[in-house]
Image: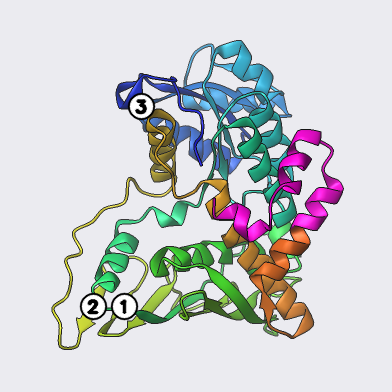
Amino acid sequence: MTFATWPADAGADAGRVRVVVVGAGPMGRAWLRTIMAERDVELAGIADLAVEVADEAAAEVGVPGLATGADAVELVRRTGAHAIVDVTVPAAHHPVTLAALRAGIPVLGEKPAAATVAEALSLAAAAQLTGQLFMVSQSRRYDDHLYATRALAAGLGRAGILSVDFFKAPRFGGFRDAMSSPLLLDMAIHQFDMARFLLGADPVSVMCDEYNPAWSWYAGDAAATAAFEFDDGARFVFTGSWCSPGLETSWNGSWRLSAEHGSVLWDGDNPPTGDAVGTGLPAADVAAPGAGISGSLREFVAALRTGAEPMGRVHENILSLAMVEAAMLSARTGRRVSIDEILDASLATALSAERDAGVRSVMAGWGSARDALSE
């Protein structure tokens, strides 16, 4: 699928891409610092419903006269910006992104793509309708050691078993402490998405057990084990907890990949190690486009300039969010849940809820959600 590039025919040597950041909270300010450090990107403005918070963020980054306002689309038009970086809360992702795409503005959004798979499908249809790029920043994909892990695995034949242990004990306070599924909803999407990246395959089904240790300070279930089947026959097992103090893992998790001719270990922070049986280890001299959100930003800019498909395009990213919803449904019902069950039910919900006739028409023309996401 193609999308509009900026400028239309300037190619890779185009000037700086001017962006408006939407959302001036703590994560928004992390994005502001990243944008200020990127030579190919210029900060054109900051939008937030609380304009005084946007003004505070503008003062913090030290750009005199930086434009601020409550409406991101209006701010883009006022400043002549080229794109929006959406760092709002998940519940706001759908209205903010839809308004931008409908106004002809490409969007780089924080994960998840939307609060639900249904809303994310609506945004995928809006991107298809408008021809504008909507890319999701799945920032933990942008790690040199993750790329090296995949490179090592690629030379070991067919991958069959991938597992990750994730054990942390953050005391966030606030909304996460009250969530019903804090680990699965707010964190596990990173590891689920990294598994898709490492295996180069798509999820088919999941069996998940979610629970809360007796000492947990979370109101909802803060621990889970989820076993996924992928379309190439590989299995991926996530075991994690957000209330496990002592000997904590990396925020990336601790990984093991077992393949036909050997295995790869990655502790999440340092270079991976591999062990091949009867074959030489492949070269692992690879690098991500950048680290974390700077990598997402650089790939977004490259996509706008060249039309190259970014790995975070919404159509590609929705399966990672579907893995989360499938795991949660499996935990609630105690049964194996297929990813297509989530996709099909979400498409029906999206069609019923959609108020934009053009977006609804695009979704109605899809043979299935799975087919639409593979285009």
Q: Nearer the viewer, residue 325 or 305?
A: 305
For the question of whether residue 15 can be seen, the reply is yes
Query: Label 2's element?
Result: strand
What colour scheme has been applied to the protein in the rendered image?
Answer: rainbow
Q: Which residue is mark 1?
A: 265
Q: Which residue is mark 3?
A: 40
Q: Which residue is mark 2?
A: 274
At label 1, which amino acid type do we have? Leu
At label 2, which amino acid type do we have? Gly
**Cβ–Cβ below 8 Å for labels 2 and 1?**
yes
Q: Nearer the viewer, residue 117 or 360?
A: 360
The mark that comes first in sequence, 2 or 1, is 1
Magenta stretch secondary structure, dominant: helix
The mark that comes first in sequence, 3 or 2, is 3
Query: Label 3's element?
Result: loop
Q: Is residue 294 above or below residue 150?
A: above
Question: What stretch of residues is rendered in magenta?
Answer: 347-375
| Residue at 85 percent of width and 47 percent of height | 353
Res. 47 image quadrant: top right
Query: Label 1's element?
Result: strand
At label 3, which amino acid type do we have? Asp
Residue 172 image offset from top left, x and y in percent: 63, 59
Residue 154 image offset from top left, x and y in percent: 28, 70
